[in-house]
Image (cartoon, rainbow, N blue to C red):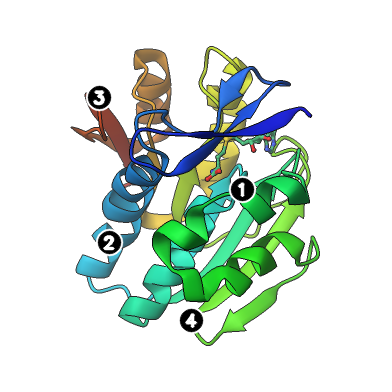
Amino acid sequence: MSQSIHPSHDGSDTVFSEKYNAHYHSVFGAIEEAIHVFIAAGLFHYHKKGYTSLRIFEMGLGTGLNAFLSYLEANRFNIKIDYQAIESDPVDNKIYDAINYPEQLSRNEKPAFLKLHSSSWGNPHHFNENFTLTKYHNSIENQVIEGNLDLIFYDAFAPTCQAHLWEEPIHKKLYDLLNPGGALVTYCTKGTFRRMLESLGYKIEKLNGPAKKREMMRATKLK
Ligand SMILES: C[S@@+](CC[C@H](N)C(=O)[O-])C[C@H]1O[C@@H](n2cnc3c(N)ncnc32)[C@H](O)[C@@H]1O
C-alpha cells in the first residue's frame, strides 16, 4: 500500500506516503499541529476579528483533518464556511475508514468525516447551514479555483519534497484569489518562501509553532 497510518505523539494518527516519502502531519502531534497552524492562527484569527462567514481554500485535502476541524468549529461558533480543497492523490477508503480523527475529536460526527471523503469531486456539498465543501481531484498547477478567498490553508508537503509548490507561479495565482485582508497560513517559514511571499505583497508574521517546531507563518494580503 502506498499510504499507511502511524500514530503521532499526541495520540492522533498521521499517514505516511511512500510516493512522496513524507508524513502528512508533524509526527510530534497531527491534531495538535492542525489546530495550532490552521485553526488557531487561521480560522480563530478571523472569527476573533468578527468574520461570520469565511471562504477557505486548502492545498492538500489529504486525510481531511483540516476540513473536519473546520466543519466542527463552524458548527461550534455558528460560522458559515465555504470550503474548497484540492487533492491530486486522494487517500484510499481503508485509510479514512480507520484513521482515528472522529474518535479523537467527535465520535458523533464520524458520518460527516466519512462524507468529507466519499462525496463526489467537483461540485459543492452542503453538510448543513454552516458548512459547504467543494473538492477538486486535480493538481493545484492545473485547477481553476474560485476566488474571493478569506483564508488559504497551505498544507503541501515540505519544500525539500515538492519545491515547485513553494515557488512564485502557484503563489501568484493564490495571491490573486485572496480578498484584501485575507491570509495564507502554513507551517513552513523557509526564508526563500517567506521573501517570495513578501515580494507578492503579503505582510508576514512569524508565529510560535506547534510542538517542537519553533515557528509557523501567517501571510496577510494588505488591504
Ligand atoms: C501534507 S499532505 C496534506 C495533509 C492534509 N492537509 C491533512 O490534513 O491530512 C499534502 C497533500 O498534498 C497532496 N498533493 C501533492 N501534490 C499535489 C498537487 N500538485 N496538487 C494537489 N495536491 C497535491 C498530497 O497527495 C497530500 O495529500
Disc 2/disc 4 C-alpha distance (Å): 15 Å
Q: According to the image, label 2 marks what residue? A: 44
Q: Is residue 214 visible?
A: yes
Q: Give the mark nearest the N terminus, 1 or 2.
A: 2
Q: Give the mark nearest the N terminus, 2 or 3.
A: 2
Q: According to the image, label 4 marks what residue? A: 130
Q: According to the image, label 1 marks what residue? A: 61
Left or right of 49? Residue 128 is right
Mark 3 surroundings within 10 Å by alpha-carbon count, few (fewer than 14), some (14 through 19), many (20 or more): few
Judge whether 21 appears above or below 89 on screen. above
Q: Give the mark nearest the N terminus, 4 or 1.
A: 1
The amino acid beneath tag 1 is Leu
Quarter of the image containing the C terminus?
bottom left
Disc 4/disc 3 C-alpha distance (Å): 34 Å
Comparing labels 4 and 3, the label whose residue is closer to the camera: 3
Percent coordinates x, y for residue 171 in the rendering: 54, 34
Question: Toward which corner of the image does residue 2 lie, by quadrant?
Answer: top right
Question: In the drawing, what numbered circle is on residue 212?
Answer: 3
Question: Toward which corner of the image does residue 115 lie, by quadrant?
Answer: bottom right
Tell me the SS state at disc 2.
helix
Judge whether 198 appears above or below 50 on screen. above
